[in-house]
Amino acid sequence: MADVRINTKRKKGRISKYIYGQFAEHLGRCIYEGLYVGEDSPIPNTNGMRNDVISALKELDIPVLRWPGGCFADDYHWRDGIGPKEDRPYMVNTNWGKVVENNHFGTHEFFELCRQLGCEAYVNANVGSGTVREMRDWVEYMTFDGDSQLVNERRANGDDEPFRLSFLGIGNENWGCGGNMRPEYYADQYRQFATFIRSSQDIYKIGCGANAEDTEWTEKVMKIAGKFMDGISWHNYTFEDGWENRGKSDDFDSEGWYNNIYDTERMRKRLIDHIAVMDSIDKEGKVDLIVDEWGNWYDVLPGTNPGFLYQQNTMRDAVTGMLILHIFHNANRRVKMANIAQMVNVLQSMVLTEGERMTVTPTYHLFRMMKAHQDGELLDAAYDEMRYDTKYGTVPKLSISASEKNGAVTVTIANTRLDCDEELEIELDREFAAVSAEVLTADNMCDVNTFDEPDKVSPKSLAAELAGNTVKVTIPKMSIAAITLK
């Protein structure tokens, strides 16, 4: 039996609700068919948004949604997505699948989606192929009131009141698909673009940060442009065995399981390195780290468009997802937002659709089980990780995080082992009156939810014995659990 000690008096910072953010790009079937089907679709919808998908996603209490990309953002010109749909120009989405993009989902549709989800908006502006004026005009179109040609154009297009734009990203992956820029060049571009973000709204400005382990980009951009930004982004995907051997999403062996677990350790170490660089430059901690693309990236499912990045979702995704979210919890001093890639039908998604059918994934259940952590105070949780060896290095058997909000304590636990359960005795520093718990696990590590078996991997209640200030519980192998104390 492993001992866990939680000190509710020792707070370790607030877990920003934005860590549980989402991402929707014009990529594959994320927007079209996934979130948006159009007002004339036989699939039940409200103003074009799928009712079944929206209903499921609302259960996650999504705090923020990033759009329109991703690589698509630096190829997106906002004027193509406003006005009557029949008049909107179409284009080829050269980033993803070379399919026709008809621009029927644009600015107004995005803010309608945010309204239906009850979340805040994070828009990525086009730096790679756009102009300062284009971005400046888009900000005015979205956020200004009063009398101007752009404001009146927005009103003519159906929205009298300004949209609430909480976050604005200045470019995306400008070291790669966003222009193959050098950090010095991008930093100067950022300074210029950011100067023209003028609005009566308080818009949080996010600079394009680094990929994976590239701390040189972080250092140079922070030194040149850091004082002009509120946050800087960072992208890190996790794989079965590296980018060249991403593996299959629904067919892997124990080595594939443990390699993926270890890749979360790589991510943790990279995050620490980037934070150290930020600390050396921004000693007062004014600039936040925004992990606005993360998640497991595997080979696409056979028979699907390679440019659509459609993959399945197993317990491996739920376990690694919890490990990574716990990493963000522990780095809450710097990490203020994270956006998993992506919300529907792309990479490590919450929801899968096929025509009129829909199913939620193990990662969906992960986000629902962990939502009580949003804006909670991280508590000191002491326990033995019980590390063990993998092909590349050691990983923890257990990952545990605890937070308190409105007098309730939430404890989330991942058991990374495929072969053994773990009995826990959780001791707190005060007594509680009630406990409830649920667990997500599967019969087989490759089990998935399908349209024919949508509940194959779904949460179940977990027996938890409460005696005063102590909880006894058994965490099954390859599982995630959430415990609530009141």
Image: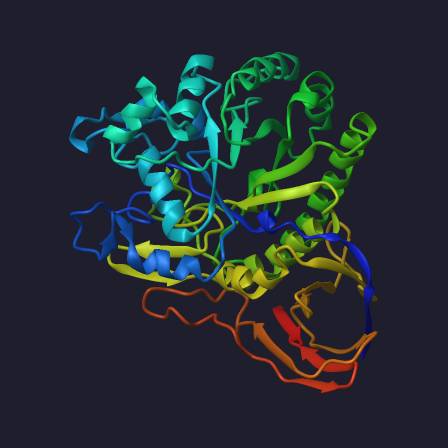
Q: Can residue 28 be seen in this view?
A: no
Could you tell me residue 300's position as x and y percent?
43, 46
Could you tell me residue 22's position as x and y percent?
50, 47
Could you tell me residue 256's position as x and y percent?
60, 55
Quarter location, residue 222: top right
Left or right: residue 149 versus residue 460 is left
In this view of the protein, which residue sits in the foreground, 289 or 450?
289
Quarter location, residue 130: top left
Q: Can residue 123 be seen in this view?
A: yes
Give the residue at x 46% y 52%. Answer: 349
Give the residue at x 61% y 40%. Answer: 291
**In the rendered view of the protein, which quadrant contains the C terminus?**
bottom right
Could you tell me residue 390's position as x and y percent?
74, 56
**In the rendered view of the protein, which quadrant contains the N terminus?**
bottom right
- Is 475 located above or below residue 19 in the figure? below
Left or right: residue 319 versus residue 23 is right
Quarter location, residue 87: top left
